[in-house]
Image (tube, coloured by chain):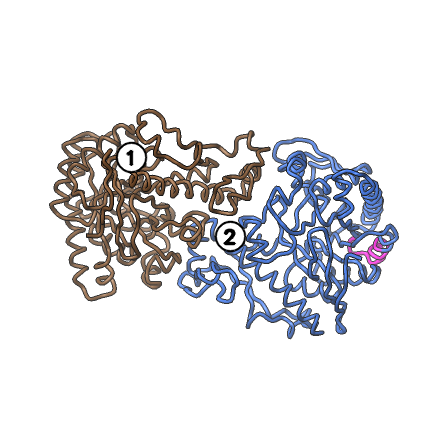
Chain colours: A blue, B brown
């Protein structure tokens, strides 16, 4: 079994484990910095690995198909080599990105045809080729192709979409099993990869339950939740987690796609999530929003607060005029020298003159906060505090 | 004497020396990376100091006056502290920047009044306040306020402008001497600073000669050449250097403002220049132009080539399609791990998707090339090869 659960909380569904994948063993629950287009925006791979200490990043089949393209990744032996990233990679299949293309995409039983919004070139994602593509990419963890429904979404539409996603999941699984049997580079690679199914069903409990059960029948290495954090309330998202996880095997890794405020992460962990990704730390960092611990780096005392707001962290907007003369360090407790040595006033200045170094420092600050949050959460679970 | 000349070439006017200033001793001739707005674009101060090994950077009074403003720099104790830069800083007074503001500025005998192009706020630079400002900034090397003439420029206009620049130079010198006598933070700081005069006179030999002689009579710690590389041919620029340096004291540092193709640097060094700055490595890097050694890192064999093109270096445009599949390192011989480990194909990809990491890597590559060029030049002079 790739996931070894080391400690299950007695207070909640939270668990700490070790996930064994092609590029090492990763402590769960974990957070994946986003490198959709083969780069964590503004930050080098060595910094993500060494300075930030991230064990895994997330990339995206759809984006990599457009740039640099599969021929480039094939030639260079995969994404690890291309972006010089030594650790694990999870790739989404791109279903969500294609879904957001609107008129440029056409979904049929066969798969999704779409045009590159930049140059009009035509592409297709099918359950079969996303398996092939993710093997070329060399992802450690591979996602099936799914359709992500909009929110709100009628039950009829949610059911039809879910049924197609299930048929696609089966075709992905078949393609994956066929590839694993091949004595080729991609075949050998596939044998080291994990394939995750994705549970859909919008906010309808019976659909979520049915979808989870039918995916479990097919048998995947792990299970992801799709179609959450697409506009519904946090309360709704957390309910979907409860419904679904009751119907997933205890010992398989669980991943919620794209859900990731600090509150979401804690509420997810309490419900049994092992894996998170989210654009928030990097995207909001680029807009000058910085995450910081409130009253020191500890979260355990405040774990049981939802729906009350969490008090263990705060966000500041560094572009605010009050930071113009704040000569205190960006984060006096940071592991990263630049975050200890540069002042908030300097970061304010960099944002004011629109210098990319500012976005870089803010992204580093936020990723450090997120990765630190996951460390604290793992300790808290181990101590039975969550 | 702040400049100690260690070796004078027998082949040319080139010389190797040690310049002693407030933040250490710097080997001459040297090149200053540009940090006009208190940041070397996209690159942290610690990287410029430690990874690139630069001993000095250039910043700009005009830009710092607008952002972050003198009150901020005063509060934090100067630019070194503000941008966390441990080594030397030279600041230009901002005459050149104000000159390029066109209708937004008004030059009179008193000084230059101008409006901030961003918000319309009014400012003034005078010979007296640029001395004050550069002391607040804490520059190691301070420039007088001058007027930079456009090119081409009539002799009458060049003469009038030069006369005013000379009057301004005298007022700067007087303000500097007065400040040095004060028992204040700025006074103590001024006593550690060097003040440079700036030779103007467009492309007119008699004006350049006269301007140099009259500045030398006033007595500055070093001499800069302004109004070169403003549109005239390289041949013209080099002539101006010859005329001027014949009339400057041998043992004072010589600086040419803003002139800096690799050819310019070598031709300047041959004529006795000790100090260079130029936006080329960072600005062209941000547009995807990369400097590289041709046939290994050595320049001495090709020093005598002008006006034939120099063959010791080349530039490549990384956005060119031929780099799409070039998986060789950006620079296999780089001291910087990221330039050895990332491929040209990856850098091409980053530029194609407009990721700031690309601009950052290209700037690092070019600054390393420029700083390496200066090292090679110093060695070549020591060996009497230039």
Front residue of A138 and A247: A138
Location of residue A245 in the rendering, given as x and y in whole percent from the top left corner: 80, 61
Q: In the image, is residue A224 part of the stretch drawn in magenta?
A: no
Q: Quadrant of the N terminus of chain A?
A: bottom right
Q: Alpha-carbon distance for marks 2 and 1? A: 42 Å
Front residue of B207 and B108: B207
Circle 1 crowding by C-alpha within 10 Å: few under 14, some 14–19, many from 20: many
Identify the residue shown where x is 60% and y is 64%.
A372
Main SS, magenta region, reads helix
B384 vs A273: above or below: above
Q: Residue furthest front?
A: B383
What span is in magenta? A201-212
Labels 2, 1: front one: 1
Q: Secondary structure at mark 2?
A: helix
Residue hosting label 2: A360
Q: Are callouts 2 and 1 both on one chain?
A: no
Q: Which mark is residue A110?
A: none
Residue hosting label 1: B386
Front residue of A226 and B364: B364
Give residue A101's quadrant in the image.
top right
| Chain name for mark 2 | A
A341 vs B199: above or below: below
């Amino acid at each position: 079994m790739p996931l070894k659960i080391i400690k299950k909380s007695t207070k909640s569904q939270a668990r700490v484990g070790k996930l064994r994948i092609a590029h090492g063993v990763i402590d769960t629950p974990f957070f994946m910095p986003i490198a959709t287009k083969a780069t964590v925006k503004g930050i080098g791979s060595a910094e993500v690995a060494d300075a930030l200490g991230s064990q895994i990043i997330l990339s995206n089949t759809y984006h990599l198909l457009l740039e640099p393209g599969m021929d480039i990744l094939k030639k260079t032996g995969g994404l690890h080599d291309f972006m010089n990233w030594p650790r694990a990679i999870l790739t989404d299949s791109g279903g969500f990105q294609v879904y957001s293309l609107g008129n440029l995409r056409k979904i049929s039983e066969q798969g999704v045809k779409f045009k590159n919004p930049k140059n009009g070139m035509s592409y297709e994602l099918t359950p079969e080729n996303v398996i092939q593509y993710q093997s070329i990419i060399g992802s450690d963890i591979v996602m099936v192709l799914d359709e992500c429904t909009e929110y709100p979404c009628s039950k009829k539409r949610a059911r039809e979409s879910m049924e197609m996603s299930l048929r696609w999941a089966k075709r992905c699984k078949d393609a994956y099993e066929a590839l694993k049997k091949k004595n080729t580079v991609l075949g050998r690679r596939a044998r080291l990869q994990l394939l995750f199914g994705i549970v859909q069903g919008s906010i309808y409990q019976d659909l979520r339950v049915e979808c989870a059960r039918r995916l479990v029948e097919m048998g995947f290495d792990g299970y992801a939740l799709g179609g959450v954090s697409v506009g519904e309330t946090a309360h709704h998202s957390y309910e979907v987690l409860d419904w679904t996880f009751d119907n997933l095997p205890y010992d398989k890794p669980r991943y919620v796609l794209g859900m990731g405020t600090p509150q979401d992460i804690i509420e997810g962990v309490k419900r049994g999530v092992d894996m998170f990704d989210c654009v928030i730390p990097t995207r909001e960092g680029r807009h000058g929003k910085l995450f910081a611990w409130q009253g020191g780096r500890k979260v355990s005392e405040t774990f049981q607060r939802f729906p009350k707001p969490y008090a263990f962290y705060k966000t500041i907007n560094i572009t605010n005029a009050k930071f113009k003369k704040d000569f205190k360090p960006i984060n006096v407790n940071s592991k990263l020298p630049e975050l200890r040595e540069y002042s908030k006033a300097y970061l304010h200045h960099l944002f004011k003159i629109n210098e990319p170094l500012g976005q870089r420092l803010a992204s580093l600050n936020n990723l450090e906060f997120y990765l630190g949050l996951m460390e604290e959460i793992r300790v808290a679970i181990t101590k039975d505090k969550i």
